[in-house]
Amino acid sequence: MPPAPKATAPPETGTDGFHEPRREDCPWCGSKRLRTRLRTPDVRQRGPGTFVVDECRDCAHAFQNPRLTAEGLALYHQDLPEAPHPVAPRRHRAAARAMLPFPEPESWLDVGTGEGGFPAAAKLYFPYTAFDGVDTTRRVQKARASGHIEEAHRGRLTDREIVNRLRARYDVVSMFHHLEHTPDPREEIRAALTALRPGGHLLIEVPDPHCAFGTLLGKWWPWYAQPRHLHLMPLANLVAELESQHCTIVATDRREPHIPYDLTGALSMVLTRALPARRTPLLRAAAPFLAATTALDHALAPLLRRTRFANTYRIIARRGDAQPRARRG
């Protein structure tokens, strides 16, 4: 198991330099009608601290409250492996196929690309497309060195230098499980639309906060991912935001993007939380149970993806001619 964060995490007061002040209103719609949806420790890395996810009773936006500052996020990311769990290539290929009904793009930007797993898979269907990537870690340079992308941009898409350099350069911008990690998803969307040419397409996949596994599994639901996921956005909210930015929603999908990992992820976190640090023999003994749970996740997937247990949704939006608008208020 990775060691716990080296610094001591502070309490959730919002006055310690690691948390922002606790919000009394929804960051999405401004409503003050909030409820506590989840209170949990860091069940993945066993780091110190307790984290709260509040939900707006009006728009159903869920968010970490109080939210970690940039320093706090760095604290809880410092012991994570730089490369997260790899995504199955078949999932990347399925996401790429979602763009086949549209004109073949000349240029494509993948946001949060990591080592370029998605561009590498997408080239099977778009061999003449130039793929670029942006990521906050040095993995993006590895993606370029491996030939998965042509240009590597290290940082956030919202960084002024990056967004100005990439203005109106792309026919497609993709964001796979990226927005939930960002302090301001709306700002990320505006930056992505700025990088698109008029008529270009924005492809987004994010966890669905309405997934029934979130209620069934509670803090063990993998997509809560506290303290690293800052926002969980309902489909209707993202659709409304994109439409307010002069976009046309051309497709939404709750079925195909489903990731068969809920039960496996929950069991893995329970074992991580329950077993002692020196646990290699115990993990070996638990391996058959994890394998069986993984098989169950995949066996149930064809059924679950058609129900409220689907855990991810996809949006494809086409940018209009107007420039993205700044956030109101």
Image: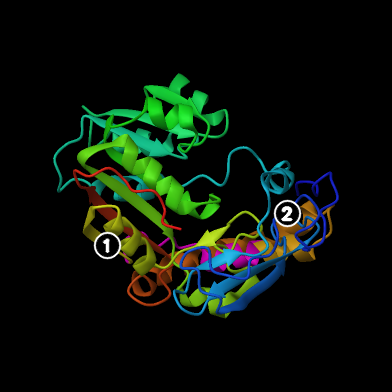
Q: Give the residue type at disc 1.
A: Thr
Can see residue 85?
yes
Q: Position of residue 210 (x, y in %)?
A: 45, 74
Q: Tell me where the magenta segment starts and ends, as one range.
A: 255-268
Q: Which residue is identified by label 2?
A: 45
Q: Is residue 281 left or right of residue 162?
A: right
Q: Give the mark nearer the N terminus: 1 vs 2.
A: 2
Residues 301 and 30: in front is 30
Residues 79 and 201: in front is 201
Q: Which residue is identified by label 1?
A: 252
Q: Under tag 2, what secondary structure?
A: loop
Q: Under tag 1, what secondary structure?
A: strand
The tag on residue 196 is: none
Q: Is residue 328 left or right of residue 243?
A: right
Vertical relation: 98 (above or below) 195: below
Q: Is residue 58 left or right of residue 226?
A: left
Q: Position of residue 298 (x, y in %)?
A: 43, 64
**Membership of 256 in magenta stretch:** yes
- The residue most toward the front is 329
Can see residue 292?
no
Q: Give the residue type at disc 2.
A: Gln
Vertical relation: 55 (above or below) 183: below
